[in-house]
Amino acid sequence: MGDRTYCKFTINKHYYEQNKEVFDKMDSDETEDDGEEISFVDYEANYGSMESYESFCQEHQIEYDRRWEAGGDYGAGNEYARNVNGEFKLHDIYDDGEAVLTELKSILNETDHAKREALLNKRIKELEPFEITPLKAPQSIDFIKNS
């Protein structure tokens, strides 16, 4: 057993309804339904991960958001999984903003406007390599049900 912390795993409700039998067999402490999204909560997730949910969604390219709190040797953050131009991508954003703030301040000290803009755009692309859009249902129902 590893470090335990809070984790919340969220998907669009459409995917839950299409794969209810699979998701209902997975382990969580609590389920939240806000009408459009379903969230599964684990108060003692191993290293802030809910592996069975992540694996299933990645295998079937189901977009999700995962939020974890800080543990013994890692900070709190979010993971976003999205379909971007036909490719399934994952991106983590940690809450620790101190290093980013220091870096942004150094970029602001750049006197050359074009260079400053290029540095900012590069850093934004590194922090958010794809647009993190709201979770949504698919445009068409062409995925495997209950695999």
Image (cartoon, rainbow, N blue to C red):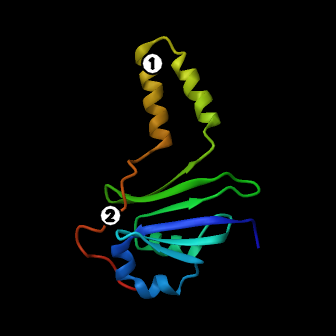
Give the number of marks: 2
Residue, x 61% and y 72% (percent of image)? Answer: 42
Q: Position of residue 134 (x, y in %)?
A: 36, 57
Q: Amino acid at mark 2?
A: Lys
Residue, x 25% and y 76% (percent of image)? Answer: 141
78 is higher (above) or lower (below) than 111: below
Q: Earlier in the sequence, mark 2 or mark 1?
A: 1
Q: Can residue 67 be seen in the rendering of this structure?
A: yes
Q: Is residue 141 left or right of residue 31?
A: left
Mark 2 residue element: loop
Q: Is the N terminus in the top left, top right, bottom left or bottom right quadrant?
A: bottom right
Mark 1 residue element: helix
Looking at this view, is 53 or 144 the one in front? 53
Looking at this view, is 21 or 122 the one in front? 21
> Which mark's residue is nearer the viewer, 2 or 1?
2
Residue, x 76% and y 68% (percent of image)? Answer: 2
Q: Amino acid at mark 1?
A: Lys
Residue designated by label 1: 115
Q: Position of residue 49 (x, y in %)?
A: 61, 67
